Structures are given as structure tokens and as C-alpha cells.
Image: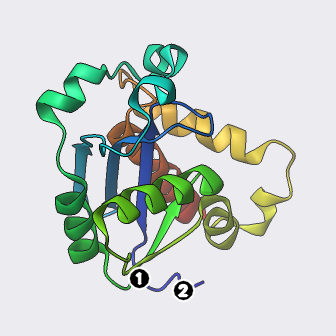
Amino acid sequence: MNTDHPPHFLDFEASGLGVLGFPIEVAWGNVDGVMECWLIRPDARWHLEVGWEPVAEGIHGIRREQLAEAGADTVWIAERMNAQLAGAVVYVDGLPYDRLWLEQLFQSAGITPTFELANFDELLYAVAPPTQTYRRGWMEQLRAVAVGRLKGLHWHRADNDVRRLIEMYRIAAARR
């Protein structure tokens, strides 16, 4: 893992966590403050009716109608992600789900990602001082401090969740 360059971070929101769930929002950013967030217009092949979980909607607050009205096309989003993240290692905090949603997005677009996803926890272990990582509950404490610094944000929106990852990284790296 190369920690010489400022890392990139990514988060998806989805219609649900079930097997028919699909990505509905994506955000990516870096510690320099460059960030993008897009609603995703569902692909016609995705299972809109059965893949949409009302419980998930209650958590992220994104309505299906918003996706039809303001969602960007999967091809456009995939091309934009590739243009901005080419060659990068991009950190996520839910690797199995985020990888699945990335694959769904890019398969829909018929494009191959030019970047790779990696586990955010591994990045934190690499940048945080070893004296911190040996303590029980250190990552939960780090998350609580980051959330405290980012008061008033609606969690489970992709851009705000990326902001939380960036803040956690900044705190951990500053303690080194």
C-alpha cells in the first residue's frame, strides 16, 4: 500500500443491502478537498421494484423519484470516475458492498474501472501510530472524534460519509 500520495476515498449509497440492491449514489474525494457526489439513474436491467428497500430509503433519505429526476447516467458517471481516479487506490469502509456496487455501475456502463478499491481500515492501520492501534476500541474512538468535528451532517449520504473517512484519515495521520 502506497501512502506517499494523498489517498482517495469513495462511498456508495444503495437501494438496499439485499441481493437485488443497486447503487443509487456515489461520492469520491481526497484530503485536498476535491470531491464529487452524484445520484445514479438506475439501469433498466436493475430490479427497481424488488431491489428498493423502504428501510434503506429511511436511512439515506433518497427517494426513487429523485433518481429518475436528477440521477446521472451510469456511462457518464463511470467515465468521470475513471478520468479522475485513474491509477489510484481508492479507500472504502465497506469493501464487499462497495466493490459489488462499483461492479454493478461499471458493468451497466460497459466500462472497466481504471482504479482499484482498498480497505479503509488497512489505510488507518498504516498511518496511525502503533501505540494508538493497540488500544481496544481505537477505531470507534477515532470515528466518534471525526463525527464530532463534522457536526450537523446527514450520515448515510455518500458525500458526507466520504467527509467522515477523510476526517478520520486526517486525525490518524496527524497523530503519527
Corner quadrant of residue 114: bottom left
Within 10 angstroms of label 2, few (less than 14), some, or many (20 or more) residues?
A: few
- Above or below, 47 against 76 in this view is above
Q: Is residue 34 visible?
A: no
Q: Report x, y in % for residue 26.
A: 34, 48
As drawn, the residue found furthest toward the left would be 69
Q: Report x, y in % for residue 21.
A: 52, 37
Corner quadrant of residue 153: top left
In the drawing, what numbered circle is on residue 5? 1
Q: Residue at x 37, y 37 (%)?
A: 160
Q: Do labels 2 and 1 touch, CB within 8 Å?
A: yes
Q: Report x, y in % for residue 62.
A: 33, 23
Looking at the rendered structure, the kind of residue marked 1 is His
Residue 17 left/right relative to 9: right
Residue 170 left/right relative to 113: right
Residue 158 left/right relative to 55: left
Q: Report x, y in % for residue 155.
A: 44, 28
Looking at the rendered structure, the kind of residue marked 2 is Asn
- Above or below, 156 against 10 in this view is above
According to the image, label 2 marks what residue? 2
- Above or below, 68 against 24 in this view is above
Could you say whether the residue bearing mark 1 is in a helix, strand or loop? loop
Q: What's the CA distance linking mark 2 and mark 1?
A: 7 Å
Q: Nearer the viewer, residue 2 or 158?
A: 158
Q: Nearer the viewer, residue 134 or 2?
A: 2
In the drawing, what numbered circle is on residue 161? none
Q: Residue at x 37, y 85 (%)?
A: 87
Residue 66 left/right relative to 10: left
